[in-house]
Image: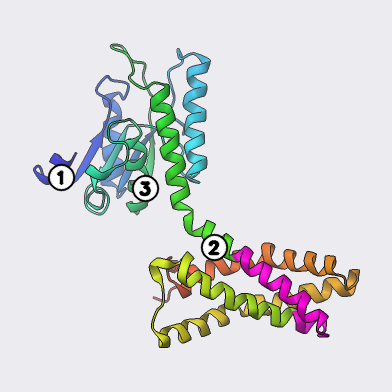
Amino acid sequence: MQYAIDELKADAILEMDADFQHPPRFVKPMVEAYLSGAEYVIGSRYIEGGSVPKEWAASRKAISFFGNLFIRTVLLNFKIHDLTTGFRLSKVRGVLDKIELVKLRDLDKFAYKVDLLYQSLKNSKKTVEVPLEFASRTKDKSKFNWKEMVATFKLAIILGIKDKQRFIKFGVVGFTGFLVNYLGLEFLKRMGLTTYWATLFATEMSIISNFILNNIWTFKDKTITSVKDVIMQFAKFNLSSLFAVIVQPLVVNGATTLFGDTSLIRLAGLLFALFLVVVPYNYIVYNLFIWRTWKIPKFFKRD
């Protein structure tokens, strides 16, 4: 593949098995999809028009189907129906040329295909699946065994965790912020503040905690260091968190008004406001506007 990129100056590269399990007649629709604008084309057994051999035993079909489902699940990619197929056509510019092929994980195993797929999907601006009628092997035996299967699943899990690291960190910081929020609320209540004002000040305490931890840990690669930038970003952070400042006191105060002003009710109200409303909202806003790890969807941009 690297030779095709470097020496042949290929525009696109097609991967397929040489044992005719990927029938050559399906090359044409793959190429047509590429010529129509797709940057990554996947021959899929699990979309309409695709299939696995009818003569396969039920156990073989189950392994193929559930193995594919497992990888789709751990990578949280349900848009693509077949993530374990080896029949793929990749555009070089913008997709393959952004991948260090010699550094793919588990290059000595079939598992490397998962890493190649994972990175190609990330690089591709347009991925298309075309039906593939997977054929039975006519000669030789498959080299894919239980060890290869375990290695493939293991790598998929590693990639899935890697892909979700930021969200996991965000969750840990959020939980820390929740503790600061709740303990601050209870402390201020005991100091004599009303539920509304205690929640308001406790919310601001958690916002400060979240900003510091997110800046030095969750978004470490985007850490803000200069004093001026820290002040500016903290102001933006507070502004973006204004939603939480408004929602949390209202929800907690409303809960205590309806069900009684007890520690348990305050906790329940805080949990409801945080996890059903505030956390999803904050995660989106922080990624889009504070540390800018996501791009703003074109829908929201002015022409």
Circle 2: residue type: Phe
Dot 2 or dot 1, earlier in sequence:
1
Predominant SS along the magenta part: helix
Let me know if residue 72 is in the magenta part. Answer: no
Instruction: Please tell me whether mark 2 sits on a helix, a strand or a loop.
Output: helix
Dot 3 or dot 2, earlier in sequence:
3
Q: Quadrant of the N terminus?
A: top left
On screen, residue 275 above or below 204 = above
On screen, residue 182 above or below 205 = above
User: Badge 2 is on which residue?
Assistant: 170
- Residue visible at 52% across and 41% down in the picture: 73
State how far apart marks 2 and 1 are (Cα): 39 Å
State how far apart marks 3 and 2 are (Cα): 24 Å
Along the line of sight, which residue is nearer the eye, 40 or 248? 248
Along the line of sight, which residue is nearer the eye, 13 or 31? 13
Q: Quadrant of the C terminus?
A: bottom left
Circle 1: residue type: Ile
Location of residue 166 in the rendering, given as x and y in whole percent from the top left corner: 48, 59
Circle 3: residue type: Leu
Q: Is residue 167 left or right of residue 222?
A: right
Viewer-nearest of labels 2 and 1?
A: 2
User: Badge 1 is on which residue?
Assistant: 5
